[in-house]
Amino acid sequence: MPLKTAVGALLLLLSACATPGISTQRGTAPANGISFIENDWKKALQAGQERTLPVFVDVWAPWCQSCRSMRATVMPSPELKPVADRFIWLAINTEVDTNAAFLERYPIDTWPTLFVLEPEQGGVVSRSLGAVSAQQLLRYLDHSEQAFHQGREDLARADALALAGRHEDAALAYQRVLEKLPPHDARRAGTTVSLLKSLAATGRAIDCVRQTAKELPALSRVEDRSRLLYVGLGCALDIETEEALTLRSALEQEALRALDTPEGTLTSPQRSSLYEVVCEVREVTGDEPGMKKMAQTWWRFLEAEAARARNAEERAALDAHREMAAALMDRPEVAIPALERSEREFPEDPGPPSRLASLYLMAGQKDLALAASERALSRVKGPSRTQVLVGHARILRARGERAQAEQLLTQALRELGPDSTRSQRHRRILEFTLTQLREDNTPTP
């Protein structure tokens, strides 16, 4: 089974588990002069109206490694100082219930997602998907500021179609934008990523892979190519046609070349994400030795990044990928000390015990897994409680407590709030896991 199913199922509570208690609030403005308004969309729009400034929005989640890393390294970067006074800065945590109205208007399926909004009506001036470096962010902000002052453009209309869920139309619109952009325009990478996402959303995975291969030669910056490679290789994982296999192999080689670039060429999240997707490619092709070798290289990279981290937040931002690499190596025990440290450093955060619960379970330490999961449940609030409950149910099942696991999920289904896009997603997760539990005929220990 590929990483997305085997490891992904085992790590569901990690990849979708929020950490609302994490100390990531931006209180004192950093040296670059940027101070974020936290989780108050209307306040940010009002400030934009008063100062006639566009509103930059960082949409993030505490469980998202790339989001956390950007918040810890990119957003405080001195390189952003020249644009500090040219925008109103807003951060939206998708795990905070009070942001439901924002998320209904601006649906999110990629973390992080960056927006620039015009403040009068909240219209989307531009959108950027995925993690970026400080230099990429500066280029994005420069183009967005121009679009704000000159009026909405074709790219903004394409983004609006994608946000409305009209991905077929959005794909056509993004394609038309690309046809007009000069070959080395800084907007090509972000526009192509948006196109790839819309193609994938409509089930056109092979077109997503083809477009990735087509656009890569036009991008001179390796950090831009890495954004496309991550999405394009993801599209290629589940296609087994001869064409797709050839393209997937070519894209894997491009990813390896990107990983071989000198230190500092890519940000930590960009490089780590490439390690992740190359591991996935090797897993789906049945190359387990190659996958484990790559996971070991990934692990060494993550440990080096942790050693040079300037603070606890930068270290904690690595936890999800360190946990995943350890799982792929079949060595969950190597990541346990790092997660135990994160739990000590962030005692109110449910993320570290959630990840510890999974690691303990993989290591066969079911009692420790249960205790860690109970700690996570005592701390988690909001929508992410669903995923922690799913992880807890799996631990109960592994301990032979199938009835208790089914009762836990059944009760969680009863307690879901009013029907909404978000509650529907959690309902599907709970129902899927409950069905798995009931259909699993493996004898309990």
Image (cartoon, rainbow, N blue to C red):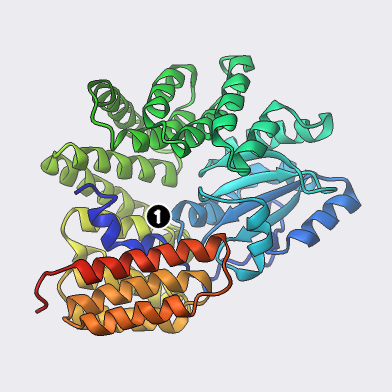
The residue that disc 1 covers is 308
Locate residue 396: give its quadrant.
bottom left
Q: Is 152 placed left or right of 304 in the picture?
A: right
Locate residue 247: give its quadrant.
top left
- Report crowding for label 1: few under 14, some 14 to 19, many 20 or more residues within 10 A (C-alpha): few
For this rendering, which residue is in front, 436 or 200?
436
Indicate the position of residue 47 as horizontal and vertical percent values: 84, 56
Residue 121 in view of the camera: yes
- For the point 21% across and 76% down, which residue is it? 397
Q: Is residue 37 above or below residue 175?
A: below
Q: Secondary structure at mark 1?
A: helix
Locate residue 127: give its quadrant.
top right
Residue 20 in view of the camera: no
Indicate the position of residue 327 as horizontal and vertical percent values: 22, 58
Q: Is residue 408 above or below residue 183?
A: below
- For the point 9% across and 79% down, which residue is it? 445
Q: Is residue 414 above or below residue 18?
A: below
Indicate the position of residue 24 as horizontal and vertical percent values: 56, 66
Q: Is 87 placed left or right of 275 in the picture?
A: right
Residue at far right of view: 50
- For the point 88% across and 51% down, which residue is it? 49
Report the label total: 1
Q: Is 76 placed left or right of 316 in the picture?
A: right
* Residue type marked 1: Arg
